[in-house]
């Protein structure tokens, strides 16, 4: 909140809702390739188990982990149990663990060895004979993108792609390929073996409740959509700031960098949901069609424009929450001279009727001052400074913020009159906080998405043309950056708001990023009892 702004506490009273009936996913065997990885332990199994605990999937469902490590079933289960205790999404009671642990299985094998898939076929036959899974099979590729084509070949050769008795669905984690050519090749490979409606390209941002709410906010209310265009919007700012560093993922991150890791998928999804036209229906193809149109409308930047409208950065050492942290180049597994970007800021222009001339600024980075993920829509100033000759602070333009982190909330900044006889104005905030308003935590993103896969609903997944349209936006930037080696890295300190160049990117148009060093704890404040 800026110095001249006051909070207006708009009551977000817990409302009594009749909880809607829990949706049911089909029973299945979830085969997870890459089962000893972080994602399986921290996200996938906790989400699947939680779904089973709340009754969204049959207790007959099973998980079969596949990875190269030679592990016994017991050791695998122990690893998963450890993940469950560490995961904030997956707290399980002992009784639930005792009930669900026998549903966890493990098979070791190299994923590029056809023999692995023959063993898998035999194992699936055994498991399906034991439990009621409807012979439905969900194959989850929690692996680096380079392994995906090999897994598709393996499944095909072993006859595991068929849908003889139940359904077969494949789930491909991001990043989908590492550039346009590899994404296109993977799409072609998948299409040789599976129908498009069997393929689920996952982006966990789409499972986040507030992200889905963007469509409800825009198209379920007549209040906002009339101003949601170039006539009223000055600029849009999309931020995904993290205070964590690269952690134990240097091997992957050194190849990916922030552009591929965050912009090519999560942030382009947020751009599309903010900018898209209303779909003709809320179904998978209508929604996905409109999103693809946005990515197609993003202006292709020339080499010179890329130099002017994109900023990359890398963190040096610094302090986060008072604790000293190393710079990126000193992280375990990172090369001393690494040029990998851990921060990106860029300006997109959308060349269509609704958005022509409205900049969409996007930024993301690791080791920034604090976590903040939000879309801020800045409206234009009023046409006349009506109150300028009164004893006033300036009334700032309205800002609608759709916040995803640290708390899921929506705020509206507007001007109001101070109480008193003088005509004096202040900038105030109206707030809606999910947690306090609905009085129940939203499900984790992976829970939502896994349940959708088990129900056969692909609305929140990216279509083949969607991922290629995303790479068409990213490829020119990636190529231009490869030719212009940055000389100033590291260029921001851990714990700061990112490189100064990112501020200049907006300042040249008279715009400003939300201040990453201010507090974002409004939801918490609303929960505090009155003094
Ligand atoms: C992942 C990226 O897709 O998203 C990570 O690979 C990033 O680098 C993460 O930290 C951010 O997602 P969330 O849900 O933790 O904000």
Image (cartoon, rainbow, N blue to C red):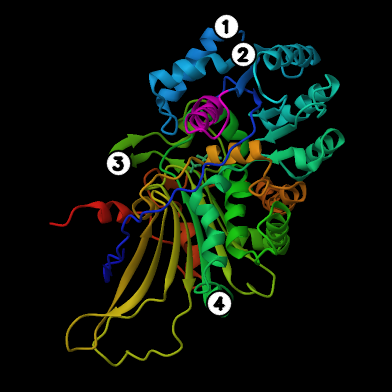
- Does 19 appear above or below 396? above
Q: Which residue is mark 3?
A: 321
Marker disc for residue 226 = 4
Q: Which mark sits nearer the N-terminus, 3 or 1?
A: 1
> Dot 2 surroundings within 10 Å: few (below 14), some, or many (20 or more)?
many
Q: Look at discs 2 and 3 and give the one toward the viewer.
A: 2
Residue at 50% x, 49% y: name it.
Answer: 209
Cα distance between the residues tagged 2 and 4? 54 Å
Q: Look at discs 3 and 1 and give the one toward the viewer.
A: 1
Residue 326: x percent and y percent? Answer: 40, 34
- Residue 96 horizontal side relative to residue 125, left or right: left
- Residue 111 horizontal side relative to residue 388, left or right: right
Pick whichever, 414 or 63, lies toward us: 63
Q: Which mark sits nearer the N-terminus, 2 or 1?
A: 1
**Residue 174 appears in the rendering:** no
Marker disc for residue 106 = 2
Asked whether disc 2 touches disc 1, contact meaning CB atoms under 8 Å apart, the reply is yes
As helix, strand or loop, the secondary structure at mark 3 comes to loop
- Tell me which segment is drawn in magenta: 38-59
Q: Which residue is mark 1?
A: 72
As helix, strand or loop, the secondary structure at mark 1 comes to loop
Rendered image quadrant of residue 390: bottom left
């Amino acid at each position: 909140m800026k110095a001249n702004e006051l909070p207006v506490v708009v009551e977000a009273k817990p409302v009594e809702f009749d909880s809607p009936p829990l949706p049911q996913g089909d029973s299945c065997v979830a085969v997870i390739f890459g089962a000893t990885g972080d994602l399986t332990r921290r996200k996938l199994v906790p989400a699947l188990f939680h779904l089973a605990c709340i009754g969204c999937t049959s207790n007959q469902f099973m998980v079969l982990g596949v990875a190269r490590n030679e592990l016994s079933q017991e050791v695998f289960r122990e690893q998963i149990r450890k993940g469950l205790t560490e995961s904030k999404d997956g707290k399980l009671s002992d009784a639930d663990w005792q009930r669900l642990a026998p549903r966890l299985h493990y098979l070791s094998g190299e994923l590029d060895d056809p023999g692995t898939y023959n063993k898998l076929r035999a194992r699936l036959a055994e498991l399906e004979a034991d439990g009621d899974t409807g012979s439905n099979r969900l194959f989850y590729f929690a692996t680096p993108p380079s392994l995906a084509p090999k897994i598709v070949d393996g499944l095909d050769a072993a006859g595991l792609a068929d849908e003889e008795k139940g359904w077969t669905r494949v789930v491909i984690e991001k990043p989908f390929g590492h550039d346009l050519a590899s994404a296109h090749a993977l799409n072609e490979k998948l299409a040789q073996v599976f129908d498009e409606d069997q393929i689920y390209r996952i982006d966990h941002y789409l499972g986040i409740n507030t992200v889905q709410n963007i469509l409800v906010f825009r198209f379920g209310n007549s209040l906002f959509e009339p101003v949601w265009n170039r006539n009223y919007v000055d600029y849009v700012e999309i931020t995904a700031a993290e205070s964590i560093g690269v952690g134990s993922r240097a091997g992957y991150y050194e190849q990916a960098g922030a552009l591929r890791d965050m912009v090519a998928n999560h942030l382009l999804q947020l751009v599309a949901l903010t900018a898209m036209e209303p779909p003709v229906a809320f179904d998978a193809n209508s929604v996905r069609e409109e999103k693809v149109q946005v990515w197609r409308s993003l202006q292709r930047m020339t080499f010179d424009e890329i130099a002017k409208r994109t900023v990359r950065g890398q963190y040096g050492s610094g302090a986060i929450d008072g604790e000293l942290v190393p710079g990126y180049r000193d992280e375990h597994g990172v090369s001393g001279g690494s040029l990998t970007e851990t921060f990106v800021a860029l300006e997109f222009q959308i060349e269509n009727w609704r958005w022509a001339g409205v900049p969409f600024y996007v930024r993301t980075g690791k080791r920034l001052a604090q976590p903040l993920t939000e879309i801020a829509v800045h409206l234009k100033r009023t046409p006349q400074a009506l109150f300028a000759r009164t004893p006033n602070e300036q009334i700032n333009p309205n800002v609608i913020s759709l916040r995803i982190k640290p708390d899921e909330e929506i705020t509206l900044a507007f001007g109001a009159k101070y109480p008193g006889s003088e005509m004096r104005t202040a900038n105030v905030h109206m707030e809606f906080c999910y947690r306090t308003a609905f009085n129940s935590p939203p499900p984790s993103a992976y829970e939502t998405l896994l349940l959708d896969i088990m129900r056969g609903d692909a609305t929140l997944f990216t279509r083949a043309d969607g991922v290629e349209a995303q790479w068409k936006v990213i490829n020119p930037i990636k190529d231009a950056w490869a030719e212009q080696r940055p000389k100033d890295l590291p260029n921001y300190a851990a714990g700061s708001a990112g490189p100064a160049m990112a501020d200049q990117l907006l300042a040249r148009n008279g715009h400003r990023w939300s201040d990453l060093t201010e507090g974002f704890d409004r939801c918490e404040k609303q929960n505090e009892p009155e003094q």
